Amino acid sequence: MNHSLPDSKTILRETWSNGTTLLAYPNLTSPAVYFTGYMQPGAIADPGDNYGLASFTTDMLMTGTKRLNFQRLHDKIESIGASLSLGTGHLSTTFFGQCLREDLETIWSLLVEVVQEPAFAEKQFKRVRNQILTGIAIQNQDTAEMASQAFSRALYGSHPYAHPDIGYAQTVAGIQKEQLESFHETHYGPNGLVLAVCGGIEPEMARDIFSRTIGSWQSDRQGLPTELPPFTPPTSSIRSHVPLEGKNQSDLVIGVPAPKTVSRDYQVCSIGNSILGKYGMMGRVGKAVREKAGLAYEVSSHLGAGIGPTAWTIVAGVNPENLEKALTLLKQELARFRGELVTEQELQDVKTQALGRLPLSIETNAGIASILVSIERYGYGLDHLRQLPAIIESVTAEEILLAAQRYWDLDKLVITSAGKALT
Amino acid sequence: MPIDLNHNLHQVQLKNGLRVMLKEIHTAPVTSTWIWYGIGSRNELPGKTGLSHWVEHMQFKGTKKFSGDEIDNLVSRVGGYSNAFTSTDWTTYFETMPSAHLHATLELESDRMANSLFVPEEVETERTVIISERDGSENYPEFRLDEAVQQHAFQSHPYRNEVLGAKEDLLSITRDDLFQHYRNFYQPANAILCVAGDISPEAVLQEVEGLFDEIPSIPVTPNVPAPEKQLVPGDQIELEGPGEAHYLEVAWRCPAASDPDFFAYSIIESLLSGPSSLNMFGSGGINNRTSRLYQALVEEDYAASVFGDLSAYIDPGVYKVFATIRPDGDPWVALKVLDDQIRRITAQELSQKEIERAIKQASALFAYGSDNITNQGFWMGYASTFADYQWVVEYLERLSAVTPSQVLNTARKYLRDDQRVVGVYRATQTQVES
């Protein structure tokens, strides 16, 4: 790896006739190789009310193939110290793995095999269903998770993003093995697959391995991607609480719809969000709620990124007795954020932070691979990292104020919490 | 491409006792600075648990030279990231920065080694923040169970205490307690400064000498706990509480990291519950789906998940196995299945092939951690807290030297039925309101 940023001269990007795309960047200082990417389908492809079907199907992929049972499949991976994981998000199935360079062909061949030829063994079906149900049961007792799920329900309403990708206990319990097989038959395949790889392998060698494995994967059953329905944001403020017994801390989410990820507004809000709840010890909200009032250990703001609607949120974990006090302080900070210009010093600080973060973002193979995936997903172009400094520098305090006023409508806040019952 | 951890490593000790380790890595324009203090919950006395962790929080509140805001800004403004961790055996602070800003981090660490203020009002604000941190952890049944198991596994040794401290101690600790703890243990002779990354060692050493050389060092006399006695035979804990899944935790005594048995124990862990990674930062670990406990417990549907934890400690600690049991399962039945696997590993020698597989996994985990400058900074100081850097350097070699008979003897020595603590958390609630 050299000190320059990955760009169109150093990133190898190629597409194959089966609809797959490879992005590769070398870091030859160690034999470790990391890769990540995405493919169809996502949870939005769940048919009807079968929430969790896509996620369940993906979980089954790593339980064995027509040629390798569970034990043999995982033995192949773990005996060489490698890893391979798949998971389902809203829009796509993501995957990641790591291995030593000499094992890359083995792992990519296995990636194709598990997606193309899963066994869907009865025993594994029952076991995975039990694991998912246990995971959901644990989530249902997690204050942060319950506050977050309540937030998604309230914000997204009838949009599919309102539902957790993993599904609900009732829906998962009702899923039959045949539904998984049928769903797999029509949704999984190479078309639309994007893979980014970084590590101790020359890009040309990675391309050759990709060509022999993922690039030559053929499937004639894969259907078209599911279209994302339109999103209608809430028209008034929403407040809900999920009561959970025996919890010493309550979790709180306040949020609004975020700007589109590929937009000028997003770049502006990203800088604004750092000031609001990320910079240093969690920006302004951290200073108000943690540093000055001592009300919370965890408090921060997050600007969601993705295809389709996303949210701009503030999250906090507080003592149940301090929930309303924390909420009041956070609303005060939001009123200030949309009421006055951020200071020149604040703006300068977060800009230099964002610029300084660039070299750190390429410190690891995983960091670089993740950037390459974003470049492809959002169509930023291979010179994105080179263009980013000028974009960051161009954001003004006036733009941030206008964006804050546009997005943080205090009359349409979605506020959810979970923990001890409210009195 | 073997990884030579001694490559470009420079070590010196200043006249005040501060140990300095510098490692040149020019893969990215980044440096990672770590300072390690030989103080943790292991050295705390009853009634004052949580002091080390609270002092760590106060180290971000301001010194004579830097206000809390300035400390915050120093790293954030240039895009760096920083954090601090308190463990049973140590407390550490790190900053990973664009390399042009290394001087600022050295200046900060030098100043807060001797000049932190501990303003009384800020001590009080932080008291509620730390109690909130503890409350957040207590929301999780696993935390409650683990705290109970830990207290049974150590009758007198401070490893029995949660690093965050007991809530009653957090309510009574004073500003003077904290400041005295800070003055007693934040001494050059009790610290290791490590810098990894895009540096010129000669220039950095000169800077370090300029900033740290004049800090006087007073002798450090920490409370060194007596070795813990054997575990109480048949010790079992059963907790009940809200939740929708049951948990099983089993803890056996494990040797100190510097004990030769530790390496054979690592092979046992790898085989039983999957390999633990020595990386604090980096690209994840290796799944444990072929481990014996996963196969027996999860594949056979007695548990939804299982994992183990063998950590490197100064004193003998515990190797723990955690299993999550689904709501209609029975943790005690899962324990019987686990026991069968323990009997198996104590009954006959492993094959050489199984040992080689564990070594290959450990080698891969090392490679995954080595692409990360922050992680390399971590390795240098981490191993020095319980042994020395050579412990990391020789780790793979020492694993490779383990024989099947050593593994069997180690399993028989430590994984005994009468030398373990069994903890069960039984969920009492099975419905969620919304």
Image (cartoon, rainbow, N blue to C red):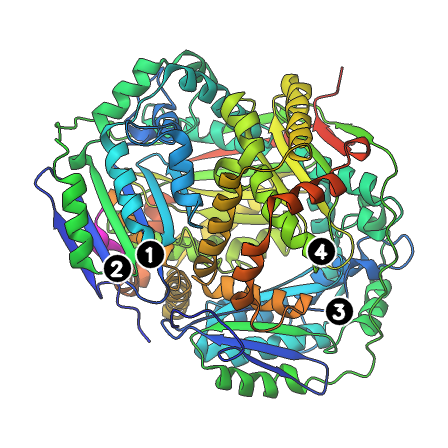
Residue at 69%, 84% (x, y): give it: A217
Residue type, label 2? Ile
Distance from Cα at disc 4 to Cα at disc 3: 21 Å
Residue type, label 3? Gln
Q: Position of residue B381 (x, y in %)?
A: 27, 48
- Chain assignment, label 2: B
Q: Are marks 2 and 1 on the same chain?
A: yes
Residue type, label 1? Ser
Distance from Cα at disc 2 to Cα at disc 3: 44 Å
Label placed on residue B99: 1
Q: Position of residue B147 (x, y in %)?
A: 48, 29
Q: Dot 3 corresponds to which residue?
A: A40
Main SS of the magenta part reads helix
- Residue A218 showing in the rendered view: yes
Q: Residue furthest left?
A: B15
Residue type, label 4? Val
Q: Are marks 4 and 2 in contact (CB under 8 Å)?
A: no
Q: Dot 4 corresponds to which residue?
A: A128
Q: Are marks 2 and 1 in contact (CB under 8 Å)?
A: yes
Q: Is residue A8 above or below residue A297?
A: below
Residue at 57%, 47% (x, y): give it: B337
* Quarter of the rendering occupied by the C terminus of chain A: top right
In the image, taking residue B75 as reference, residue B387 lies left or right, namely: left
